[in-house]
Image (cartoon, helix red, strand yellow):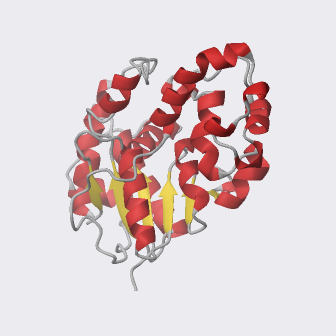
Amino acid sequence: MAAPLLLVDGHHLLHRAWYGFPARILSRDGLTDRTGVFGFTALLRKAQVQHADGFELLVVFDAEDGAQTRMVKDAAYKSQRPAPPRELIGSLALVKGALDLTNVRWVEQPGFEADDVIATLTTLARDSGRAVDILSSDKDYIQLLADPSVRLLNTSLAAEHRYTGGEHILPRYGVFPEQWPDYRALTGDPADNIPGARGIGPKTAAALLSERRRLENIPAEELRAAWTLQWPQILRWREMIKLDTKADVPAGLVTGRATAELPAAARVLDELDLW
């Protein structure tokens, strides 16, 4: 039987490694910042030891042109994000080298964001009966939780709150996982520079989407005139928020075999001669 699958949002984990450590990790001469590669490797090993023993690990990175398709629909998409530090970007190649050294497969698919590749790999894995955990704090993945064998894992939270499953979404947000793109189109997503409808907050959005409605099923009499004027834009935002479950992925990317226990981060950097 194939091992369960842990899909890792690579840029999310690298960002967390870069900004989440209390002190910078430097090379022995004190001149080169190794926080990105050390932190990424340490966090990935910790996730495996604590939550993914016996899982196959696969890391997915955003392609440089991954956001282009959504930017064509709305030029403001992610435009508010500042450019990352040059040193963080430089860590990316080192992270990939560390993954190669430890035999963890990774993919950066041209033309696609990581969340679309992860959504596609999740769908393929579930079609073959494999359970899937997704290591990320990105709420866009909530729409994949309609399947009870898919969970989100956020290891930055307290242990009792690290897993989110489909059963948590209705009590928390008032909508079902499959309604997430509709809900976020109404309420907005600041991380992606999607403002949402003016005057619609979480409670109003949940009320409009009651009884498992989608945007098309909301009665016209429940919509204010200002919302109706915004409706074409709201529908466009929903399409941007929806994850693509049919992204191009390389054949044979997943093996079905559990990933061997990862070595400590210090050992990996030593073997890569990064100290």
Residue 250 visible in this rendered orientation of the protein: yes
Q: Is residue 25 left or right of residue 233?
A: left
Count of marks overlaid on the render: 0
* Residue 58 falls in image quadrant: bottom left
* Residue 215 on image: x %, y %: 63, 36
Q: Where residue 146 sits in the image (x, y, percent)? A: 60, 59
Q: Position of residue 251 (x, y in %)?
A: 21, 64
Q: Quadrant of the N terminus?
A: bottom left
Specify the farthest residue to the bottom.
Answer: 1
- 255 w.r.t. 235: above or below: below
Q: Nearer the viewer, residue 155 or 39?
A: 155
One can see residue 23 in this view: no
Quarter of the image for residue 221 reads top right
The spot of residue 97 in percent (x, y) is 22, 52
Outermost residue, front side: 220
Left or right: where does residue 69 sit relative to residue 3?
left
Residue 183 appears left or right of 56: right
Q: Nearer the viewer, residue 232 or 72?
A: 232
77 and 268: which is toward the camera: 77
| Figure check: 258 above or below 100 | below
